[in-house]
Amino acid sequence: MNQFKYNVDPSIDKVFIYGFGFTGKWLTSNIDRKVDGFIDTDIKKKGEKFNGVEVFSYEDAKNFVDPKTEIIISTVDIFDVVPLIDKLDKQKVTPIGYFLDNTKANNNTTGEQDEYIEYSLRTVEYSHKNYRDKNKLFIRSLDLMITERCSLKCQDCSNLMQYYKSPKNMDFEDLKKEMKIVCEKFDFINEIRLIGGEPFMNKEIYKILEWLCEFKKFEKIVIYTNATIPLKEDYSDILQNNKIIFSITDYGSLSKNTKVVTDFLDKYKIPYRIHTPEYWTDSGRLVYENNNKTPAELKEFFSDCCAKNLYTVLGEKIYRCPFVANADNLKAIPNDKNNYVSIHDTKENIKNHLYNTEYLPGCNYCKGRSFESVEIKPAIQTKRIFDYKKLQD
Protein backbone atom coordinates (compact mmCIF):
# COMPACT_ATOMS: atom_id res chain seq x y z
CA MET A 1 0.00 0.00 0.00
CA ASN A 2 1.10 3.56 -0.66
CA GLN A 3 1.46 6.74 1.35
CA PHE A 4 -1.29 9.31 0.83
CA LYS A 5 -0.91 13.02 0.39
CA TYR A 6 -3.40 15.50 -0.97
CA ASN A 7 -2.53 19.19 -1.20
CA VAL A 8 -5.31 21.75 -1.30
CA ASP A 9 -4.89 24.57 -3.82
CA PRO A 10 -3.66 27.68 -1.89
CA SER A 11 -6.27 29.82 -3.69
CA ILE A 12 -9.05 27.94 -1.88
CA ASP A 13 -10.50 29.74 1.16
CA LYS A 14 -12.63 26.95 2.65
CA VAL A 15 -12.50 23.15 2.53
CA PHE A 16 -15.45 20.89 3.35
CA ILE A 17 -15.57 17.10 3.34
CA TYR A 18 -18.81 15.60 2.04
CA GLY A 19 -19.48 12.47 4.09
CA PHE A 20 -19.15 11.96 7.85
CA GLY A 21 -17.98 8.37 7.54
CA PHE A 22 -14.70 6.59 8.21
CA THR A 23 -12.91 7.99 5.16
CA GLY A 24 -14.07 11.54 5.85
CA LYS A 25 -12.94 11.34 9.47
CA TRP A 26 -9.58 9.87 8.43
CA LEU A 27 -9.08 12.69 5.92
CA THR A 28 -9.18 15.36 8.64
CA SER A 29 -5.74 14.15 9.77
CA ASN A 30 -4.37 13.44 6.31
CA ILE A 31 -4.72 16.56 4.17
CA ASP A 32 -2.40 19.51 4.38
CA ARG A 33 -4.75 22.07 5.91
CA LYS A 34 -7.56 22.53 8.41
CA VAL A 35 -10.98 21.29 7.33
CA ASP A 36 -13.76 23.84 7.82
CA GLY A 37 -16.52 21.31 8.23
CA PHE A 38 -18.26 18.13 7.14
CA ILE A 39 -21.39 18.10 5.00
CA ASP A 40 -23.65 15.08 5.23
CA THR A 41 -26.99 14.16 3.67
CA ASP A 42 -28.02 12.38 6.87
CA ILE A 43 -29.70 15.12 8.91
CA LYS A 44 -29.24 13.08 12.12
CA LYS A 45 -25.48 13.66 11.95
CA LYS A 46 -25.83 17.45 12.01
CA GLY A 47 -23.96 19.00 14.93
CA GLU A 48 -21.70 16.01 15.56
CA LYS A 49 -17.98 16.67 15.65
CA PHE A 50 -14.77 14.80 14.94
CA ASN A 51 -11.27 16.19 15.47
CA GLY A 52 -12.97 19.49 16.25
CA VAL A 53 -14.67 19.55 12.83
CA GLU A 54 -18.45 20.02 12.87
CA VAL A 55 -21.04 18.32 10.65
CA PHE A 56 -23.45 20.54 8.69
CA SER A 57 -26.52 19.50 6.74
CA TYR A 58 -26.82 19.87 3.00
CA GLU A 59 -29.35 22.65 3.55
CA ASP A 60 -26.83 24.47 5.77
CA ALA A 61 -24.19 24.13 3.05
CA LYS A 62 -26.30 26.16 0.65
CA ASN A 63 -25.74 29.19 2.89
CA PHE A 64 -21.95 29.10 3.32
CA VAL A 65 -20.47 27.37 0.27
CA ASP A 66 -19.14 29.99 -2.16
CA PRO A 67 -16.91 30.11 -5.29
CA LYS A 68 -13.75 29.93 -3.14
CA THR A 69 -14.81 26.64 -1.55
CA GLU A 70 -13.50 23.15 -2.32
CA ILE A 71 -15.68 20.13 -1.52
CA ILE A 72 -13.89 16.80 -1.09
CA ILE A 73 -16.20 13.81 -1.64
CA SER A 74 -15.41 10.98 0.78
CA THR A 75 -18.64 8.99 0.58
CA VAL A 76 -18.95 5.75 -1.39
CA ASP A 77 -22.33 6.66 -2.91
CA ILE A 78 -20.75 9.26 -5.17
CA PHE A 79 -23.51 8.95 -7.78
CA ASP A 80 -26.05 10.27 -5.23
CA VAL A 81 -23.80 13.05 -3.96
CA VAL A 82 -22.52 14.57 -7.22
CA PRO A 83 -25.97 15.87 -8.35
CA LEU A 84 -26.41 17.55 -4.95
CA ILE A 85 -22.97 19.16 -4.98
CA ASP A 86 -23.50 20.39 -8.54
CA LYS A 87 -26.26 22.64 -7.17
CA LEU A 88 -23.89 24.35 -4.72
CA ASP A 89 -21.82 27.46 -5.47
CA LYS A 90 -18.26 26.13 -5.25
CA GLN A 91 -14.96 26.41 -7.10
CA LYS A 92 -13.77 22.82 -6.98
CA VAL A 93 -15.07 19.31 -6.33
CA THR A 94 -12.60 16.51 -5.56
CA PRO A 95 -13.64 12.82 -5.42
CA ILE A 96 -10.88 11.74 -3.04
CA GLY A 97 -11.01 8.17 -4.33
CA TYR A 98 -9.16 9.34 -7.45
CA PHE A 99 -6.16 10.07 -5.20
CA LEU A 100 -6.25 6.90 -3.14
CA ASP A 101 -3.94 4.20 -4.41
CA ASN A 102 -4.25 1.21 -2.08
CA THR A 103 -3.48 3.74 0.64
CA LYS A 104 -2.30 2.85 4.14
CA ALA A 105 -4.16 4.14 7.19
CA ASN A 106 -1.40 6.47 8.39
CA ASN A 107 -2.32 9.04 11.05
CA ASN A 108 -5.40 7.01 11.92
CA THR A 109 -7.20 8.97 14.63
CA THR A 110 -10.64 7.45 14.00
CA GLY A 111 -10.50 4.90 16.82
CA GLU A 112 -11.09 2.06 14.33
CA GLN A 113 -8.57 -0.64 13.41
CA ASP A 114 -6.07 0.29 10.69
CA GLU A 115 -7.24 -2.73 8.69
CA TYR A 116 -10.84 -1.53 8.83
CA ILE A 117 -9.90 2.00 7.76
CA GLU A 118 -7.81 0.63 4.88
CA TYR A 119 -10.80 -1.44 3.81
CA SER A 120 -12.96 1.72 3.92
CA LEU A 121 -10.42 3.72 1.91
CA ARG A 122 -10.25 0.94 -0.67
CA THR A 123 -14.05 0.92 -0.94
CA VAL A 124 -14.10 4.66 -1.64
CA GLU A 125 -11.27 4.27 -4.16
CA TYR A 126 -13.09 1.55 -6.09
CA SER A 127 -16.41 3.40 -5.96
CA HIS A 128 -15.00 6.69 -7.24
CA LYS A 129 -12.77 5.26 -9.95
CA ASN A 130 -15.49 2.97 -11.28
CA TYR A 131 -17.99 5.84 -11.24
CA ARG A 132 -15.68 7.53 -13.72
CA ASP A 133 -15.61 4.42 -15.95
CA LYS A 134 -19.12 4.29 -17.44
CA ASN A 135 -18.44 1.11 -19.41
CA LYS A 136 -18.14 -1.19 -16.40
CA LEU A 137 -20.90 -2.87 -14.44
CA PHE A 138 -19.72 -2.15 -10.91
CA ILE A 139 -21.46 -1.93 -7.54
CA ARG A 140 -20.01 -1.03 -4.20
CA SER A 141 -21.67 -3.91 -2.31
CA LEU A 142 -24.01 -6.83 -2.79
CA ASP A 143 -25.92 -8.37 0.11
CA LEU A 144 -25.94 -12.14 -0.03
CA MET A 145 -28.69 -13.39 2.26
CA ILE A 146 -27.57 -16.88 3.26
CA THR A 147 -30.32 -17.50 5.81
CA GLU A 148 -33.78 -16.39 6.88
CA ARG A 149 -33.02 -17.59 10.40
CA CYS A 150 -31.83 -15.35 13.21
CA SER A 151 -30.64 -15.96 16.77
CA LEU A 152 -32.56 -12.85 17.86
CA LYS A 153 -36.18 -11.93 17.26
CA CYS A 154 -36.24 -8.15 16.80
CA GLN A 155 -39.75 -6.83 16.26
CA ASP A 156 -38.47 -3.94 14.12
CA CYS A 157 -35.98 -5.78 11.90
CA SER A 158 -35.86 -3.85 8.60
CA ASN A 159 -35.01 -7.13 6.82
CA LEU A 160 -38.40 -8.48 7.96
CA MET A 161 -37.09 -11.57 9.78
CA GLN A 162 -40.02 -11.23 12.22
CA TYR A 163 -42.42 -12.25 9.42
CA TYR A 164 -40.82 -15.60 8.51
CA LYS A 165 -42.95 -18.47 9.81
CA SER A 166 -40.62 -21.27 8.67
CA PRO A 167 -37.23 -19.61 8.10
CA LYS A 168 -34.69 -21.62 6.18
CA ASN A 169 -31.04 -21.51 5.20
CA MET A 170 -29.88 -20.96 1.66
CA ASP A 171 -28.63 -24.19 0.13
CA PHE A 172 -24.92 -24.14 -0.64
CA GLU A 173 -25.28 -25.71 -4.08
CA ASP A 174 -28.00 -23.23 -5.05
CA LEU A 175 -25.81 -20.39 -3.84
CA LYS A 176 -22.89 -21.60 -5.94
CA LYS A 177 -25.01 -21.65 -9.09
CA GLU A 178 -26.42 -18.20 -8.30
CA MET A 179 -23.07 -16.53 -7.56
CA LYS A 180 -21.36 -18.02 -10.61
CA ILE A 181 -23.97 -16.32 -12.80
CA VAL A 182 -23.71 -13.05 -10.84
CA CYS A 183 -19.93 -12.99 -11.25
CA GLU A 184 -20.26 -13.55 -14.99
CA LYS A 185 -22.44 -10.44 -15.31
CA PHE A 186 -20.46 -7.97 -13.17
CA ASP A 187 -17.06 -6.53 -13.96
CA PHE A 188 -16.38 -5.98 -10.28
CA ILE A 189 -18.17 -5.99 -6.91
CA ASN A 190 -16.26 -4.22 -4.18
CA GLU A 191 -17.69 -6.34 -1.39
CA ILE A 192 -20.05 -9.21 -0.75
CA ARG A 193 -21.97 -8.65 2.50
CA LEU A 194 -23.02 -11.90 4.16
CA ILE A 195 -26.27 -11.23 5.99
CA GLY A 196 -29.44 -12.89 7.23
CA GLY A 197 -30.89 -13.16 9.78
CA GLU A 198 -27.73 -14.12 11.54
CA PRO A 199 -25.34 -15.62 8.95
CA PHE A 200 -23.83 -18.08 11.45
CA MET A 201 -27.25 -19.73 11.79
CA ASN A 202 -26.41 -21.34 8.45
CA LYS A 203 -24.16 -24.26 9.39
CA GLU A 204 -22.69 -24.25 5.89
CA ILE A 205 -21.28 -20.75 6.34
CA TYR A 206 -17.67 -21.93 6.51
CA LYS A 207 -18.05 -23.85 3.24
CA ILE A 208 -19.69 -20.79 1.72
CA LEU A 209 -16.85 -18.54 2.88
CA GLU A 210 -14.14 -20.87 1.64
CA TRP A 211 -15.79 -21.03 -1.78
CA LEU A 212 -16.44 -17.29 -2.04
CA CYS A 213 -12.82 -16.48 -1.19
CA GLU A 214 -11.76 -18.08 -4.46
CA PHE A 215 -13.46 -15.39 -6.54
CA LYS A 216 -11.45 -12.48 -7.90
CA LYS A 217 -14.49 -10.43 -8.87
CA PHE A 218 -14.78 -8.85 -5.44
CA GLU A 219 -12.36 -7.34 -2.96
CA LYS A 220 -13.89 -8.20 0.41
CA ILE A 221 -16.41 -10.44 2.14
CA VAL A 222 -17.99 -8.60 5.07
CA ILE A 223 -19.76 -10.78 7.63
CA TYR A 224 -22.56 -8.95 9.49
CA THR A 225 -23.11 -10.69 12.81
CA ASN A 226 -24.74 -10.04 16.19
CA ALA A 227 -22.02 -12.05 18.00
CA THR A 228 -24.44 -14.51 19.58
CA ILE A 229 -22.75 -17.58 18.08
CA PRO A 230 -19.09 -18.42 18.90
CA LEU A 231 -16.72 -18.94 15.98
CA LYS A 232 -15.23 -22.39 15.41
CA GLU A 233 -11.52 -22.96 15.93
CA ASP A 234 -11.53 -25.72 13.30
CA TYR A 235 -12.25 -23.08 10.63
CA SER A 236 -9.87 -20.35 11.78
CA ASP A 237 -7.75 -20.80 8.63
CA ILE A 238 -10.76 -19.92 6.45
CA LEU A 239 -11.62 -16.84 8.52
CA GLN A 240 -8.01 -15.61 8.27
CA ASN A 241 -8.33 -15.14 4.52
CA ASN A 242 -7.43 -11.52 3.73
CA LYS A 243 -10.75 -11.06 1.93
CA ILE A 244 -12.76 -11.54 5.15
CA ILE A 245 -13.71 -8.77 7.55
CA PHE A 246 -16.33 -8.67 10.32
CA SER A 247 -18.94 -6.05 11.20
CA ILE A 248 -20.29 -6.78 14.68
CA THR A 249 -23.37 -5.18 16.17
CA ASP A 250 -23.17 -5.37 19.94
CA TYR A 251 -26.68 -5.63 21.36
CA GLY A 252 -25.44 -5.66 24.95
CA SER A 253 -26.93 -8.50 26.99
CA LEU A 254 -28.52 -9.96 23.84
CA SER A 255 -25.10 -10.38 22.16
CA LYS A 256 -24.10 -12.93 24.75
CA ASN A 257 -20.87 -14.05 23.05
CA THR A 258 -19.43 -10.69 21.98
CA LYS A 259 -16.21 -11.08 23.98
CA VAL A 260 -15.80 -14.70 22.89
CA VAL A 261 -16.10 -13.62 19.25
CA THR A 262 -13.82 -10.57 19.51
CA ASP A 263 -11.21 -12.55 21.48
CA PHE A 264 -11.21 -15.10 18.65
CA LEU A 265 -10.81 -12.37 16.01
CA ASP A 266 -8.02 -10.70 18.01
CA LYS A 267 -6.24 -14.02 18.48
CA TYR A 268 -6.15 -14.68 14.73
CA LYS A 269 -5.70 -11.01 13.75
CA ILE A 270 -8.94 -10.96 11.74
CA PRO A 271 -10.08 -7.36 11.13
CA TYR A 272 -13.42 -6.25 12.50
CA ARG A 273 -15.48 -3.28 13.57
CA ILE A 274 -17.69 -3.52 16.65
CA HIS A 275 -20.42 -0.99 17.33
CA THR A 276 -23.70 -0.53 19.15
CA PRO A 277 -26.93 -0.54 17.06
CA GLU A 278 -26.93 2.39 14.66
CA TYR A 279 -29.83 4.41 13.21
CA TRP A 280 -32.76 2.05 13.87
CA THR A 281 -35.98 3.47 12.45
CA ASP A 282 -39.57 2.27 12.29
CA SER A 283 -39.06 0.70 8.86
CA GLY A 284 -39.57 -2.95 9.77
CA ARG A 285 -43.26 -3.14 8.96
CA LEU A 286 -45.24 -4.18 5.93
CA VAL A 287 -47.81 -1.48 5.19
CA TYR A 288 -51.17 -2.31 3.61
CA GLU A 289 -52.96 1.00 4.15
CA ASN A 290 -52.68 4.01 1.83
CA ASN A 291 -50.31 2.08 -0.42
CA ASN A 292 -51.36 3.73 -3.66
CA LYS A 293 -48.72 6.42 -4.06
CA THR A 294 -48.49 8.21 -7.40
CA PRO A 295 -45.34 7.76 -9.53
CA ALA A 296 -44.21 11.25 -8.46
CA GLU A 297 -44.70 10.38 -4.78
CA LEU A 298 -42.86 7.08 -5.23
CA LYS A 299 -39.91 8.83 -6.90
CA GLU A 300 -39.58 11.22 -3.96
CA PHE A 301 -40.02 8.36 -1.48
CA PHE A 302 -37.30 6.33 -3.20
CA SER A 303 -34.97 9.31 -3.60
CA ASP A 304 -35.13 9.97 0.16
CA CYS A 305 -34.46 6.35 1.12
CA CYS A 306 -31.13 5.64 2.84
CA ALA A 307 -31.31 1.93 1.89
CA LYS A 308 -31.86 2.25 -1.86
CA ASN A 309 -28.26 1.31 -2.64
CA LEU A 310 -28.15 -1.83 -0.50
CA TYR A 311 -28.27 -4.17 -3.48
CA THR A 312 -29.44 -7.66 -2.50
CA VAL A 313 -29.33 -10.97 -4.35
CA LEU A 314 -32.02 -13.44 -3.34
CA GLY A 315 -33.79 -16.20 -5.24
CA GLU A 316 -31.86 -15.52 -8.49
CA LYS A 317 -33.01 -11.89 -8.44
CA ILE A 318 -31.14 -8.68 -7.69
CA TYR A 319 -33.04 -6.05 -5.71
CA ARG A 320 -32.25 -2.42 -4.95
CA CYS A 321 -33.03 -2.82 -1.23
CA PRO A 322 -33.33 -5.61 1.37
CA PHE A 323 -36.87 -4.60 2.39
CA VAL A 324 -38.29 -5.21 -1.07
CA ALA A 325 -36.12 -8.33 -1.45
CA ASN A 326 -37.60 -9.92 1.67
CA ALA A 327 -41.13 -8.63 1.06
CA ASP A 328 -41.04 -10.26 -2.38
CA ASN A 329 -39.46 -13.42 -0.96
CA LEU A 330 -42.29 -13.62 1.57
CA LYS A 331 -44.79 -13.02 -1.28
CA ALA A 332 -46.09 -10.16 0.85
CA ILE A 333 -46.24 -7.70 -2.06
CA PRO A 334 -47.65 -8.16 -5.57
CA ASN A 335 -45.35 -9.82 -8.08
CA ASP A 336 -43.94 -6.97 -10.15
CA LYS A 337 -40.87 -7.32 -12.36
CA ASN A 338 -40.02 -3.67 -11.78
CA ASN A 339 -39.04 -4.58 -8.21
CA TYR A 340 -35.99 -6.54 -9.33
CA VAL A 341 -33.87 -7.75 -12.20
CA SER A 342 -33.14 -11.42 -12.86
CA ILE A 343 -29.53 -12.57 -12.63
CA HIS A 344 -30.19 -14.32 -15.96
CA ASP A 345 -31.02 -11.03 -17.69
CA THR A 346 -28.56 -9.24 -19.98
CA LYS A 347 -25.71 -7.23 -18.51
CA GLU A 348 -27.21 -4.08 -20.02
CA ASN A 349 -30.62 -4.68 -18.42
CA ILE A 350 -29.01 -5.41 -15.05
CA LYS A 351 -27.00 -2.19 -15.32
CA ASN A 352 -30.11 -0.22 -16.26
CA HIS A 353 -32.06 -1.50 -13.25
CA LEU A 354 -29.23 -0.89 -10.78
CA TYR A 355 -28.18 2.49 -12.12
CA ASN A 356 -31.37 4.08 -13.45
CA THR A 357 -34.31 2.89 -11.32
CA GLU A 358 -36.38 5.86 -10.13
CA TYR A 359 -38.61 3.93 -7.72
CA LEU A 360 -39.82 0.44 -6.87
CA PRO A 361 -43.50 -0.62 -6.80
CA GLY A 362 -42.63 -2.36 -3.53
CA CYS A 363 -42.03 1.05 -1.96
CA ASN A 364 -45.82 1.24 -1.63
CA TYR A 365 -45.63 -1.33 1.17
CA CYS A 366 -42.80 0.30 3.14
CA LYS A 367 -43.11 2.94 5.90
CA GLY A 368 -40.01 4.68 4.58
CA ARG A 369 -36.39 4.87 5.61
CA SER A 370 -35.28 8.41 4.97
CA PHE A 371 -32.40 10.18 6.67
CA GLU A 372 -34.99 12.23 8.55
CA SER A 373 -36.81 9.18 9.96
CA VAL A 374 -37.12 9.20 13.74
CA GLU A 375 -34.84 6.75 15.52
CA ILE A 376 -36.43 4.08 17.71
CA LYS A 377 -35.21 1.79 20.46
CA PRO A 378 -33.27 -1.00 18.73
CA ALA A 379 -33.61 -4.76 19.07
CA ILE A 380 -36.84 -4.99 21.07
CA GLN A 381 -37.45 -8.73 21.25
CA THR A 382 -40.72 -10.44 20.45
CA LYS A 383 -41.88 -14.03 20.77
CA ARG A 384 -44.57 -13.85 18.12
CA ILE A 385 -44.32 -14.19 14.35
CA PHE A 386 -45.91 -11.22 12.66
CA ASP A 387 -48.87 -11.74 10.33
CA TYR A 388 -49.03 -10.31 6.84
CA LYS A 389 -51.10 -10.52 3.67
CA LYS A 390 -49.89 -12.99 1.06
CA LEU A 391 -50.33 -11.20 -2.29
CA GLN A 392 -48.71 -13.77 -4.60
CA ASP A 393 -49.67 -17.35 -5.43
Image: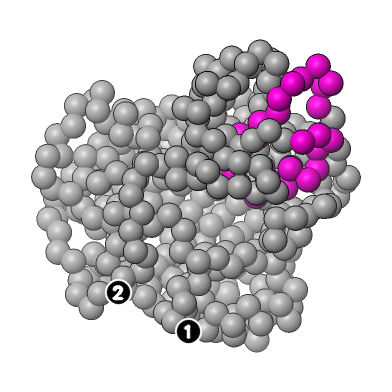
User: Residue at the location (88% across, 45% down)?
Assistant: 3
Asked which secondary structure carries label 1, the reply is loop
Mark 2 sits on what residue? 381
Residue 39 against residue 154 in the figure, above or below? above
* Residue in the picture at 52% in, 21% down: 63
Magenta stretch contains residue 26:
yes
The answer to whether 10 appears left or right of 19 in the picture is right
For disc 1, the neighbor class at 10 Å (few under 14, some 14 to 19, many from 20) is some
Give the residue at mark 1. Answer: 256
Is 350 in front, or is 27?
Answer: 27
Secondary structure type for disc 2: loop
The x and y percentages for residue 179 are: 52, 54
Q: Amino acid at mark 2?
A: Gln
Q: Tell me what residue is drawn at x 74 percent, y 21 percent.
A: 13
What residue span does the magenta drawing correspond to?
A: 8-34
In the image, what residue occupies the spot 12% across and 39% down? 290
Q: Nearer the viewer, residue 383 or 350?
A: 383
| Res 53 → quadrant | top right
Position of residue 63 relative to residue 154, above or below, is: above
Q: Mark 2 vs mark 1: which is more N-terminal?
A: 1
Pick whichever, 185 or 334, lies toward us: 334
* Amino acid residing under circle 1: Lys
